[in-house]
Image (cartoon, rainbow, N blue to C red):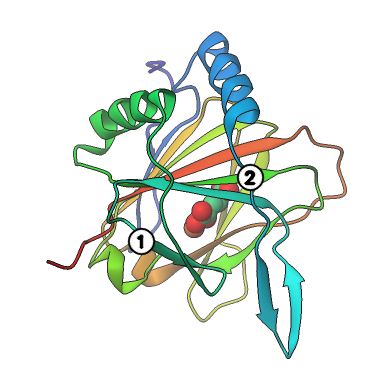
Amino acid sequence: MDLFDTPTVQLPDAELEFLPHWLDAACADRWLAQLQAETPWEQPQVFLHGKHYPVPRLLAWYGDAQASYRYSGLIHQPLPWTALLAEIRAAVEQVAGQRLNGVLLNYYRDGNDSMGWHSDDEAVLGRDPLIASLNLGGTRRFDLRRKGQTRIEHSLELGHGALLVMRGATQHYWQHQVAKTGKSVAPRLNLTFRLIRIQP
Ligand SMILES: O=C(O)CCC(=O)C(=O)O
Ligand SMILES: [Fe+2]
């Protein structure tokens, strides 16, 4: 980590650790190229107001065998860890300080791809879930607002090689989004590592 980076973002009732230059450019380039080449992307449909819509980005879910995960209204069985994703997970676990058993890959093809307001607060993530988000490729703005409010309180530019760790009560009090943008942006690959609490 670059010593001159500010490692934290001060927001009440949130715990955010932001490492904008966590990866050097050569490593980030290599990981992006390999993940772009080897990921079996899907574009699931969501059912909203009686109609089916494709989600506005591409997705893939990897994890330990029992770490199935519900998103876009469907339960997804994990793909098995690839050598590269296992290596990335081990590096992210060092920063997280805990085990992580799944990763959601989001691919934003251009500025029209987005992710709407949400919190990562599903029951299977347990209380105070840690979400570690690695960013590769084009820079996109990541907005935060308090639950129940519409005003954006804080935004971060998540660029190539940046790591953002959200901990503690963050998901309880805050929502986040990646909005569409009219700017021309390079494709962006985001990996959010999670710990799915597996029922015994
Ligand atoms: O792409 C991003 O930065 C956000 C991803 C996200 O919020 C999620 O996967 O839950
Ligand atoms: Fe999220």
Q: In the displayed image of the protein, which residue is found farthest to the bottom?
A: 50
Residue 58: x and y in percent read 66, 50
Residue 103 at least partly seen: no
Residue 66: x and y in percent read 27, 56
Q: In the displayed image of the protein, which residue is found farthest to the top?
A: 26
Using the image, determine if residue 51 lies above or below residue 88: below
Residue 90: x and y in percent read 28, 28
Using the image, determine if residue 138 lies above or below residue 31: below
Q: Quadrant of the C terminus?
A: bottom left
Dot 2 alpha-carbon crowd within 10 angstroms: few under 14, some 14 to 19, many 20 or more: some
Q: Quadrant of the N terminus?
A: top left
Report which quarter residue 11 is drawn in.
bottom left
- What residue does disc 1 label? 170
Q: Which mark is residue 41?
A: 2
Most foreground residue, 163 or 86 = 86
Residue at the location (73% across, 59% down)?
56
